[in-house]
Image (tube, grey):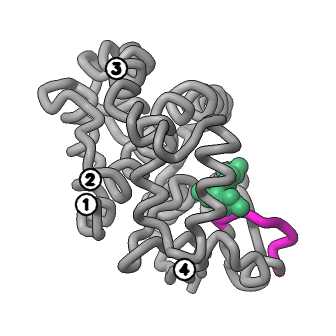
């Protein structure tokens, strides 16, 4: 059985966005896995991986760290299971898309949810989150992040606008069926859903309808979790 190390927040919330990518990639491949929750400050729990971030997977004796490397590993190790990329061109385009998500959509979502994340992480991780996400990445204080969260939703809406247009034409980012590009984008919205009570998307929009389709996939594995 494959094992996945991921983060655990208050009341057992599973909020690591990069781990959601690994979870959905494993489910897409039809692989059984068990999860091993860890706190951000418990680095010794993942020291065997040679790094300090989750997700990490262990498949037999093979250890893979980093969500993109995990997707590439699963695609090459399990070639007969449904494809995450759809061939070499899809592999390349997906990598470009994931980079755009990480450099545009993730930074647009962060000011919306940072204070809410702080409030729902394991108490042991509160200082780490404040120092890394709020004071480090956002270069602000927790109070200012909280006060500015709603205003940041407008900027997020502008950042995701190209996706609203694309998803009017096809049901998934990857076309007629979901694949890894969908999971990478969805992970940002799942991060928000698990940790923040804010409505981050216009409920009538194509992107909100797409998020509902993603929540239904793989037996509703992303829908049926503890949320904010
Ligand atoms: N590029 C990495 C990024 C992973 C990452 O940043 N994970 C976060 C949790 S979502 C983490 O473990 N951070 C460790 C820390 O903040 O100390 C990947 O795609 O797996």
Q: Which residue is drawn at 63% across and 28% down?
A: 103
Q: Do the residues labelled 3 and 1 touch (CB within 8 Å)?
A: no
- Of 226 and 150, the residue lying toward us: 150
SS for tag 4?
strand
Q: Earlier in the sequence, mark 4 or mark 2?
A: 4
Q: Which of marks 3 and 1 is in front?
A: 3
Specify the quadrant of the image occupied by residue 151: top left
Q: Is residue 101 one of those drawn in magenta?
A: no
* Region in magenta: 48-55
- Label number found at residue 150: none
- Of 9 and 176, the residue lying toward us: 9
Q: Nearer the viewer, mark 4 or mark 2?
A: 4
Q: Residue at x 40, y 21 (%)?
A: 160
SS for tag 2?
helix
Residue at mark 4: 37
Give the x, y percent position of residue 32.
47, 78
Specify the quadrant of the image occupied by residue 7: bottom right
Q: Which quadrant does the N terminus fall into? A: bottom right
Gap in angstroms between the C-alphas marked 2 and 3: 24 Å
Gap in angstroms between the C-alphas marked 3 and 1: 25 Å
Q: Ligand 1 shows up in which quadrant of the image?
A: bottom right
Q: Do the residues labelled 2 and 1 touch (CB within 8 Å)?
A: yes
Count of marks placed on residues: 4
Q: Nearer the viewer, mark 1 or mark 4?
A: 4
Gap in angstroms between the C-alphas marked 2 and 1: 5 Å
Q: Which of marks 2 and 1 is nearer the N terminus?
A: 2
> How many residues crowd around disc 3 within 10 Å: few (fewer than 14), some, or many (20 or more)?
some
């Amino acid at each position: 059985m494959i094992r996945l190390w991921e983060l655990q927040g208050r009341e057992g919330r599973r909020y690591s966005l990069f781990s959601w990518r690994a979870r959905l990639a494993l489910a897409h491949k039809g692989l059984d896995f068990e999860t091993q929750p860890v706190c951000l400050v418990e680095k010794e729990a993942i020291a065997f991986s040679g790094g300090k971030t989750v997700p990490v997977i262990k498949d037999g004796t093979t250890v893979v760290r980093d969500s993109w490397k995990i997707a590439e590993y699963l695609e090459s190790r399990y070639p007969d299971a449904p494809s995450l990329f759809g061939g070499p061109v899809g592999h390349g385009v997906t990598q470009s898309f994931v980079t755009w998500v990480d450099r545009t959509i993730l930074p647009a979502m962060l000011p919306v949810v940072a204070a809410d994340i702080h409030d729902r992480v394991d108490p042991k991780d509160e200082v780490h989150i404040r120092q890394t996400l709020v004071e480090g990445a956002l270069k602000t204080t927790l109070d200012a992040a909280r006060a500015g969260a709603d205003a940041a939703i407008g900027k997020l809406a502008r950042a995701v606008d190209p996706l609203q247009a694309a998803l009017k034409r096809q049901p998934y980012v990857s076309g007629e069926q979901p694949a890894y590009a969908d999971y990478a984008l969805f992970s940002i919205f799942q991060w928000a859903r698990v940790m923040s009570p804010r409505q981050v998307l216009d409920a009538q929009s194509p992107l909100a309808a797409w998020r509902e389709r993603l929540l239904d996939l793989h037996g509703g594995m992303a829908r049926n979790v503890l949320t904010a």
